[in-house]
Image (cartoon, grey):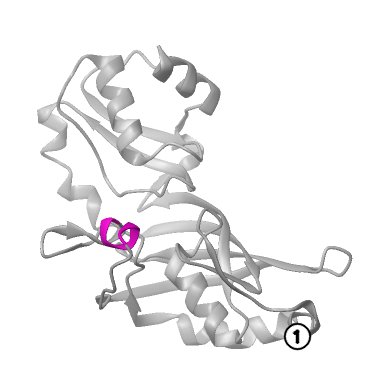
């Protein structure tokens, strides 16, 4: 791992740890308390995370927070979960006899409806606060909440893969998404599934870019190394 000193670090976060876990990892490695990040990634998600170490650099956080992001997302059709990704509890699943009727053209046809500026409902399992409490805290208590919405912009939405596996009775697809800050990719996939009438949930999510910064230039943090050090 890096010899961590005050500065700006591009990190390729593995799937598993939260963004807060990565921040704590940098605090422990550097011995510097003032550490922050620029844009949360779900524990499921991997990819680019900008880490700022020391007060001098955390003061610059606002320069990076509102920048456009790029993601590669894989999803499965026919399943809905409460968290909108595969870590959640399945709340709806449609039979294969209905699901198999959906094809690549059906998905391609609705994608333009999700491009440009759109109102997006925030997922219940998110860190957005209502009256001082995070939504996911309310969700875990089983509280009913009127979810807020926000205006976001999807600038690019490209279907990279569409795979129908008859033997496994599954349909998976992959999208490349370029979007404004504040966009929830889990909500995008959930809404696409609703529009198709079959439901959809995220299986893999990877952030590839933040503005001009690419994950290709990031320092890869291996999950095995992270766990080993974290347990010590």
Residue 140's spot in the image, x, y percent? 34, 57
186 shown above or below 209: below
- Image: magenta residue range: 137-141
Residue 1 visible from this viewpoint? no
Q: For this rendering, which residue is in front, 180 or 184? A: 184
Whether 63 is drawn above or below 161: the answer is above
Q: Is residue 164 magenta?
A: no
Where residue 57 sits, quadrant-wise, is top left
Q: Main secondary structure of the magenta part?
A: helix
| Residue shown at the point (78%, 77%) measured from the top left | 96
Q: Seen in the image, is 138 located left or right of residue 224?
A: left
Image quadrant where one finds the C terminus? top left
Q: Residues within 10 Å of mark 1 (few under 14, many from 20)?
A: few
Q: Position of residue 211 (x, y in %)?
A: 35, 53
| 225 relative to 218, above or below | above
Is residue 217 visible in the rendered structure shown here? yes
Question: Which residue is nearer to you in this view: 97 or 49?
Answer: 97
Frontmost residue, 210 versus 138: 138
Which quadrant would residue 158 be assigned to in this image?
A: bottom right
Residue position for label 1: 98
Q: Residue at x 14, y 27 (%)?
A: 34
Quadrant for the N terminus in the image: top left
Q: Residue at x 87, y 70 (%)?
A: 166
At horizontal 32% and vertical 62% (from top left) the residue drawn is 139
Q: Position of residue 54 (x, y in %)?
A: 15, 26
Q: Position of residue 9 (x, y in %)?
A: 32, 31
- Callout count: 1
Outermost residue on the right side: it is: 167
């Amino acid at each position: 791992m890096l010899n961590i000193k005050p500065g700006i670090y591009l990190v390729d976060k593995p799937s598993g740890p939260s963004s807060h876990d990565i921040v704590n990892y940098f605090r422990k490695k550097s011995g510097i308390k003032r550490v922050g990040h620029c844009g949360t990634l779900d524990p499921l998600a991997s990819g680019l995370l900008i880490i700022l170490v020391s007060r001098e650099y955390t003061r610059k956080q606002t320069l990076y927070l509102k920048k456009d992001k790029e993601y590669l997302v894989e999803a499965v059709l026919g399943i809905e979960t409460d968290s909108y990704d595969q870590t959640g509890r399945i709340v709806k699943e449609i039979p294969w006899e209905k699901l198999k009727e959906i094809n690549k053209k059906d998905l391609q046809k609705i994608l333009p409806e999700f491009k440009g500026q759109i109102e997006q409902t925030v997922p219940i399992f998110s860190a957005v606060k209502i009256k001082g409490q995070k939504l996911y805290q309310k969700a875990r208590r089983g509280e009913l909440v009127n979810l807020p919405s926000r205006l976001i912009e999807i600038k690019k939405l490209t279907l990279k893969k569409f795979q129908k596996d008859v033997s496994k009775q599954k349909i998976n697809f992959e999208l490349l998404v370029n979007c404004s800050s504040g966009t929830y990719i889990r909500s995008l996939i959930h809404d696409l599934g609703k529009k198709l009438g079959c439901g959809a949930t995220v299986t893999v999510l990877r952030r590839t870019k933040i503005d001009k910064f690419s994950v290709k230039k990031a320092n890869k943090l291996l999950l095995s190394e992270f766990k080993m050090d974290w347990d010590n």
